[in-house]
Image (spheres, rainbow, N blue to C red):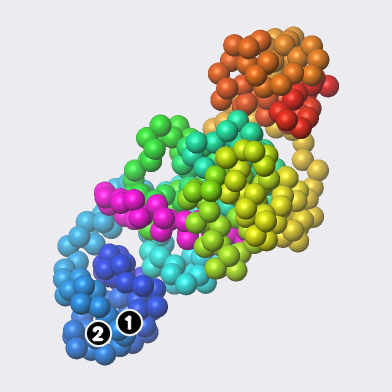
């Protein structure tokens, strides 16, 4: 495909037509360049274009599209068009797939590798963070690409767990492809791009809006065979992702939480409404028809970009504090560790087989 044809497709995506309308125009005029050159009366005759859509299509200049293509070249950003063989087929099959995807890093072959989304709330509890990280790790170790939105909370924990596994992880942006949102996740993004990818339908320097994050959710679910909601209250963007997944014919899974926990109300209601209850990656894999394999704990010295050394029994403050069964509050008081660090260490120790978790967030040394 020539650069002008790429520019024309970028131009067409910038008009933000529905996929149905864009596809009908492409079929009628043969290409995005054909759409750009078409007379307004002919455009109007193909499909029910609204007045604002026609107004946007009247601007036929490729100047901005050319700038976008050049910015992508300068920033080592791949432009993946919807008719490219590498474009994920699961995403292409949804109602409104992007005409253009912008890709940083190396996108795994999602036409060959199964993908599962792990999503949830930003203000996650230690319970939710531990579940998401462990879920991400075990899915990745079983050859599944973990997809999420790289938001703080559950998304970040799922990506972090996946980075310790064998399969690259993919972050879907609700912002311009050249922006890291939130900025505090820049170190996480660097690790993701080391072997996996970040993708967006929004080009470099695009100014995102609140609705762009909602639109992003259809891509998260569209890339995947299933969506796991690890933790979510009643009002959570992850429930939008779950709803979109159902519309797209995907499996929806939810991790249960305490009936008294506001942070798990959304998950518990999903389960009550028919979502599959899952407690582990093994449950997800079995439901999708895969045979889970036995997963060893994380390696003592994982390869770059993640370095998480195995805690030493004689030095680890958590193991030193566990002289019996202790709950989370007791461990926080004994170790003096912040809750987020404490939960991260507890997750690692549990994966290493050093401790066992009992119901109610009680822990015991093995």
Return the residue at label 2. 43
- Image point 75% across, 23% down: which residue? 363
Q: Which label number is shown at residue 213?
A: none
Q: Judging from the image, what secondary structure is the residue with disc 1 in?
A: helix
Q: Quadrant of the C terminus?
A: top right
The reply to whether residue 162 is in sight is no
- Image point 31% across, 55% down: which residue? 203
Is there CB contact under 8 Å for labels 2 and 1? yes
The reply to whether residue 236 is in sight is yes
Left or right of 64: which side holds 301?
right
Q: Nearer the viewer, residue 195 or 82?
A: 82
Residue 181 position within the rendered picture, expressed as x and y whole percent measured from the top left: 38, 41
Q: Magenta stretch: residue 219 in it? A: yes
Residue 207 position within the rendered picture, expressed as x and y whole percent measured from the top left: 26, 50
Nearer-N-terminus badge (2/1): 1
Q: Which label number is shown at residue 25?
A: 1
Q: Judging from the image, what secondary structure is the residue with disc 2 in?
A: helix
Q: Nearer the viewer, residue 258 or 275?
A: 258
10 Å crowding of disc 2: few (<14), some (14-19), many (20+):
many
Left or right of 188: which side holds 328?
right
Which of the 4 quarters of the picture holds residue 45? bottom left
10 Å crowding of disc 1: few (<14), some (14-19), many (20+):
many
- Image point 52% across, 56% down: which residue? 241
Left or right of 224: which side holds 292?
right
In this view, 194 is above or below 210: above
Provide the residue span drawn in magenta: 202-226
């Amino acid at each position: 495909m020539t650069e002008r044809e790429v520019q024309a497709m970028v131009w067409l995506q910038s008009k933000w037509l529905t996929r149905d309308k864009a596809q009908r125009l492409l079929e009628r005029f043969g290409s995005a360049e054909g759409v750009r050159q078409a007379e307004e009366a002919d455009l109007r005759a193909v499909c029910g274009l609204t007045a604002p859509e026609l107004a946007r299509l009247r601007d036929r200049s490729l100047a901005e599209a050319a700038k976008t293509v050049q910015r992508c070249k300068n920033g080592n950003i791949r432009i993946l068009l919807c008719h490219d063989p590498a474009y994920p087929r699961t995403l292409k099959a949804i109602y409104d797939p992007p005409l253009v995807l912008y890709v940083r890093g190396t996108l795994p072959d999602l036409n060959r590798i199964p993908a599962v989304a792990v999503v949830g709330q930003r203000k996650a509890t230690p319970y939710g963070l531990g579940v998401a990280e462990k879920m991400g790790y075990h899915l990745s170790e079983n050859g599944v690409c973990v997809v999420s939105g790289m938001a703080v909370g559950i998304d970040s924990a799922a990506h972090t767990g996946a980075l310790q596994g064998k399969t690259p992880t993919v972050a879907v942006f609700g912002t311009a492809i050249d922006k890291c949102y939130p900025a505090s996740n820049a170190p996480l993004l660097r690790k993701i791009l080391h072997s996996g990818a970040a993708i967006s339908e929004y080009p470099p320097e695009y100014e995102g809006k609140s609705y762009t994050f909602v639109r992003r959710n259809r891509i998260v679910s569209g890339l995947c065979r299933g969506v796991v909601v690890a933790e979510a209250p009643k009002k959570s963007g992850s429930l939008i992702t779950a709803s979109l997944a159902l519309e797209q014919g995907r499996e929806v899974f939810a991790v249960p939480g305490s009936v008294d926990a506001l942070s798990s109300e959304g998950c518990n209601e999903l389960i009550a409404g028919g979502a599959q209850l899952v407690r582990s990656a093994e449950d997800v894999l079995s439901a999708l028809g895969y045979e889970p394999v036995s997963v060893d704990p994380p390696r003592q010295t994982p390869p770059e970009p993640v370095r998480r050394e195995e805690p030493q029994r004689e030095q680890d403050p958590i193991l030193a504090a566990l002289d019996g069964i202790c709950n989370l509050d007791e461990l926080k008081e004994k170790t003096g560790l912040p809750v987020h660090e404490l939960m991260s260490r507890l997750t690692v120790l549990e994966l290493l087989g050093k401790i066992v978790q009992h119901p109610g967030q009680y822990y015991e040394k093995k």
